[in-house]
Image (cartoon, helix red, strand yellow):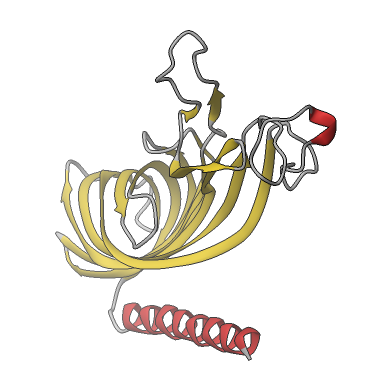
């Protein structure tokens, strides 16, 4: 029953996203003139150790010469942390304890003669946005613009645990020789052991903005460059600032 409930929820969410995306296309089609295009995005973030590139689709309507109603589908790529580094206790300091350093988003607890880190290894994020783009003509072929949108996003996180090296112990917690130890990690040893815990989905609505320029060699085709930034914020999710520099090819009609 739990599996069926999860599948029903996922199906409802997928249906909602498809209806929203279809509605946005329909709304943009009511106007006399508009645009459609897409491109790639080079991503960066101080919140994570690694980022992969993504892509985006832009479409919308020209409200007037200075304002556009714009919608986007954006893939923000994969963001990931390096695994925490194990730091053993200082044997010359009786108050020193073993720890994990350079942790990402998670918690450290004691675990059967060692310590355990539980947290997020990586996130994959995409979203649908709607907003306004204010633009200004510099000359006949160049525009500058600023965009402000609300981004409805979904992220899938990879959860994992990392067990440290363990001091050999018996069932009573007493220190013993390694051959008599009963406190092995899930890997079946006393050495460091990573374990995947599967994935979780997170959704939220956040403000997403950008600015850039549009080059129009002709009246119907344009090259767009944009710097954008969004702060993702959800329950049990690493509050993350994601930045992107995208280049897109657009058709204007």
Q: Is residue 183 left or right of residue 59?
A: right
| The image quarter in which residue 127 lies | bottom left
Placement of the N terminus among the 4 image quadrants = bottom right
Closer to the camera in the image, 55 or 222: 55
Query: Hey, which residue is sitting farthest top in the picture?
Result: 92
The C terminus is located in which quarter? bottom left
Q: Residue at x 55, y 21 (%)?
A: 88
Q: Is residue 31 above or below residue 105?
A: below
- Residue 70 visible somewhere in the drawing: no
Residue 187: x and y, percent?
77, 44
Q: Residue at x 26, y 48 (%)?
A: 210
> Is 236 left or right of 83, judged from the image as shown?
left
Residues 220 and 59: in front is 59
Q: Is residue 205 at least partly visible in the picture? A: yes
Labels in figure, total = 0
Please state the horizontal and vertical placement of residue 90, each as a whole percent of the image.
Answer: 49, 14
Image side of residue 240 versus residue 136, left or right: right
- The structure residue drawn at horizontal position 48% and vertical position 43%, both measured from the top left corner, is 109
Q: Residue at x 40, y 78 (%)?
A: 25
For residue 244, above or below residue 95:
below
Residue nearer the viewer, 120 or 76: 120
Dividing the picture into quarters, in which one does residue 227 lie? top left
Residue 93, how many percent across, how many down?
A: 43, 12
User: x and y percent of residue 41 in the render?
Assistant: 46, 44
């Amino acid at each position: 029953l739990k599996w069926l409930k999860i599948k029903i929820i996922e199906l409802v969410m997928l249906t909602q996203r498809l209806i929203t995306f279809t509605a946005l296309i329909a709304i943009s089609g009511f106007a006399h003139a508009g645009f459609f295009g897409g491109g790639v995005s080079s991503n960066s973030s101080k919140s994570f150790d690694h980022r992969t590139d993504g892509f985006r689709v832009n479409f919308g309507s020209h409200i007037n010469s200075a304002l556009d109603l714009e919608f986007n589908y954006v893939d923000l790529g994969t963001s990931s942390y390096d695994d925490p580094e194990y730091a053993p206790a200082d044997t010359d300091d009786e108050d020193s304890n073993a720890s994990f350093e350079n942790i990402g988003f998670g918690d450290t607890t004691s675990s059967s003669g060692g310590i355990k880190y539980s947290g997020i290894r990586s996130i994959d994020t995409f979203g649908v946005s709607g907003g306004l783009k204010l633009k200004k003509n510099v000359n006949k072929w160049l525009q500058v613009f600023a965009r402000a949108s609300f981004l409805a996003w979904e992220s899938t996180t990879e959860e994992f645990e990392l067990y440290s090296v363990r001091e050999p112990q018996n069932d009573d917690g007493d220190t013993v020789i390694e051959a008599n130890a009963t406190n092995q990690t899930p890997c079946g040893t006393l050495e460091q052991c990573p374990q995947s815990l599967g994935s979780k989905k997170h959704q939220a609505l956040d403000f997403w903005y950008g600015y850039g320029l549009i080059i129009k060699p002709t009246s119907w085709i344009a090259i767009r460059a944009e710097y954008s930034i969004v702060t993702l914020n959800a329950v049990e999710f690493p509050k993350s600032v994601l930045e992107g520099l995208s280049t897109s090819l657009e058709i204007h009609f």
